[in-house]
Amino acid sequence: MARPEYSFEAVEKKWQDYWERSGTFRAPGPGDRGFDPSKRKFYVLIEFPYPSGAGLHVGHPRSYTALDSVARHKRMQGCNVLYPIGWDAFGLPTENFALKTGTHPRIVTERNVANFRRQLKRLGFSFDWSREVNTTDPAYYKWTQWIFLKLLEKGLAYKAEVPINWCTSCKVGLANEEVVGGVCERCGGQVVRRMRKQWMLAITRYAERLIDDLAGIDFLEKIKAQQINWIGRSVGARVVFRAAEVPGVEVPVFTTRPDTLFGVTFMVVAPEHPVLERLLPGSPGEAEVRAAAERMKAVDITERTNPDTEKIGVFTGRHVVNPANGDLVPLYVANYAVMDYGTGAVMGVPAHDQRDFLFARKYGLAVKVVIRPADRGLDAAKMEAAYEEPGVQVNSGQFDGTPNTEAMGQITAWLESRGAGKPEVTYHLRDWVFSRQRYWGEPIPVVHCAKCGVVALPERELPLLLPDVERFQTTETGESPLALIDAWVNTKCPKCGGAARRETDTMPQWAGSSWYFLRYLDPDNAEALASRQALEYWMPVDWYNGGMEHTTLHLLYSRFWHKFLFDIGVVTTPEPYKKRTSHGMVLGENGEKMSKARGNVVNPDEMVERFGADAFRLYEMFMGAFDQAIPWSTEGLNGMYRFLNRVWELAAKVAPDAPVKKDVERLLHQTIKKVGDDIEAMKFNTALAQLMTLANRLGQEPKVRVEDFRRFVLLLSPFAPHIAEELWEELGGAPSVSTQPWPAYDAAAAKEDEIEVPVQVNGKLRGKVTVPADSAEAFIKEQALADANVKNFTEGKQVVKIVYVPGRLVNVVVK
RNA sequence: GCCCGGGUGGCGGAACGGCAGACGCGCCGGUUUCAAAAACCGGUGAGGGCAACCUCAUGCGGGUUCGAUCCCCGCCCCGGGCACCA
């Protein structure tokens, strides 16, 4: 009856086949066979991967393993768990690869998906593979297009001539979010500003709700902070200044400091500001001013708006009138003013804004104090920096003497009553540039008709299929490759039947990923993106884990789409995700970011071949705190392999006549508690440490009780599911271990009956006393004072007091 | 500049304001082996002491507390995000 040695190859293959054959992880929804309405649902979501040619990276499984453990734990707690997987398969890298090799992106995608699927299956994740989705599948993108049509119908999709971030290398327009440090997020290529008619989505209309609704959801605080920061809400006022020399022209500004309005001594506008066209004609030095504005516009925007760039202003020869006090102030064109924030015009208050202060000093402009500190006055002539702190209004007419924090609202209200301003909120967040001039994306389902303008395709014509092309090369004009396919482009207007041209821009990669979690609920539905029933049952996602890098992109976009779908009655919850967490990056063994260029990439396939999927999964969880970046260590992985070997050997010690040991029982119950709690709290590393402690303790026994080992296997199963299935079977259990109930925790059994209480003297550890757990305080103190070493430190001294923390420690304070 | 994290043995990391260093890696010693690797068992913060024990130690400097890795104040370093945003 010699037991075989632990062979992860055999064990893992066996159980992966079993799970697949038996549909162990299929999650029945309402209406499906085997659906049990009495079970609580739990929707676990990981970010579906982009199937790149490089294959799975050791970073991907960190998130997948963690949530797989959560999913398995929840199932054992009796939940109906949905843990789906799919492919975010449209996108530039595939298209660029296709361009280079001449292989169609569809073929490249199929190949990459097959590879990813193989790699994921080897790791034994409990995905419901029957719900697999792929954003490039016409049956999927039909609904991406459908959502776009709805956005268009409701006026949230519009076409605008906007300056876009043009990546000179990808030859594609990018959203602000895709420009990182002035270069393309994807390829690192140079990004320039270019004007182009683009489809835009009005995410800014949801800005307020995107901030406010964070209050009701369980997102990591840093994620909330980053989203709020990104949306960049500023509360202030719009103030209208009238042009002095040109009647009927107004220049509105946005300011967060209406309390400083009486201190305005100049105004600047962006060189692109349209008001210049009305003000400049006939002004002295018109030609020079125009030339200066052109020079400012010619500078690359990222450089122009760099804080280190020298601020340049040119007097326009015109003035504007301060509506608060009638002051005539000079109007400048300045390089630091930008057209796409606020109104493109800024009021200059040098006394109370450091940037304005420096500008005023440079150009010899007046400095006028309107707020002084509570305890002293300010002399404009002697100021060396702007005074930006709170204070009391001065030189502000009827508001003099009012604290500036109060004056803000009062001045705004006063302006409003005189028709010269109103409260206003602006956002840093811009509308979402939704057009891409590329092939491998969802076609935008509209046509351009000479007579009817932009016309949406009727819903019945969806999906609008991406046509096959021979060449994916972007055109020299920057148009999408689709523009070259005449047979596709030339079509009939659905409204008037006349000649029309199809839209040739495609959607960005963020489109398909903005709603994929809905499609999982009902992936084959041909009538709707998902059935009402499925949406009502499964939504919202209970726990969504992903990378911090998606906080301001995918996460914000998908919340926006979801709110829109909620508003039009398609989905039933205002927020898609109840809880959002994020994992830390896996770094190379040298502690640097893993990359091909650094030569420190670890291939998961190789690791699984050497140590097995269970050991690999264990290491991914054990390596460190889940939310922190951690360097990879193949030695560490080997340690997990050794642990599994010890577990395997432990099974050989299982005997029916093993005695009950009180302390083993206690440790077991403590472990049941800790592992469960730690999974909920994402402290996977300490959950495993506890399991190792228990395994080590069991290993000390010559014989291990069946009951004890059974429960140990159950506790291990969310993390190392293959070996757990095998041992479960060996113990006589029917598969699958994943359908067994989570072991019951008994607080009484976990309780120690003797406790060791550390004794401190003046806060320093001097001894320990072992007492029954239910000892009276007086007895414990007495024992503590009687300890030999404690006596060494208390002898001849006066005991001032004795601090006793029940069950924790005694501290004797002496003098 | 602003907003988040983080700094603990040789390394990854543990510690409701209460025994600093759980667990793992590495290292050292042992068992096994002709030998090595692997595996298994034991030891392992630094310094002192024959030992019992003692001293020091959680980036730096203060503070609160009977007691601080943890809370407060002021710094230094590392990582991430935002940044002429009016």
Image (spheres, coloured by chain):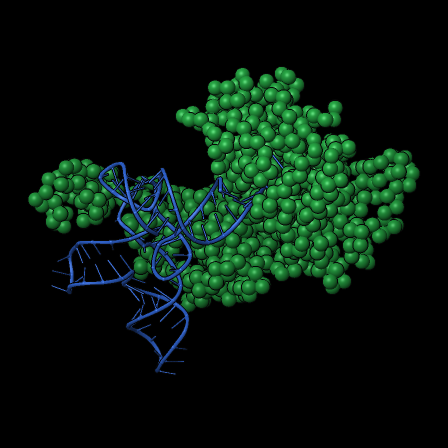
Q: Residue at 19% of width from left, 43% of height from top?
A: A762
Query: Residue at 73% across / 62% down in the picture?
Result: A100
In-front residue for pair A421/A316? A316
Q: Is residue A164 left or right of residue A73?
A: right
Q: Quadrant of residue A176?
A: top right
How many numbered callouts? 0
Would you say residue A604 is visible in this rendering? no
Q: Residue at x 83, y 44 (%)?
A: A502
Kindly identify the residue that appears in the image at 38 percent across and 55 percent down: A692
Can the viewer see residue A248? yes
Examine the rendered structure and indicate whether residue A449 appears above or below residue A436.
Answer: above
Horizontal and vertical percent position of residue A358: 55, 39
Where is residue A323 shown, x and y percent of the image? Answer: 63, 22
Chain B is which colour?
blue
Image coordinates for residue A74, horizontal then vertical, percent = 50, 43
Between A507 and A399, which is closer to the camera in this rendering?
A399
Q: Which chain is green?
A: A
Q: Nearer the viewer, residue A128 or B70?
A: B70
Percent coordinates x, y for residue A804 in the rendering: 21, 38
The part of the image, by quadrant, that contains residue A307 is: top right
Left or right of A205: which side holds A755?
left
Rendered position, A643 above or below A161? below
Res. A786 image quadrant: top left
Asked if residue A455 lies left or right of residue A609, the reply is right
* Residue lying furthest right: A498
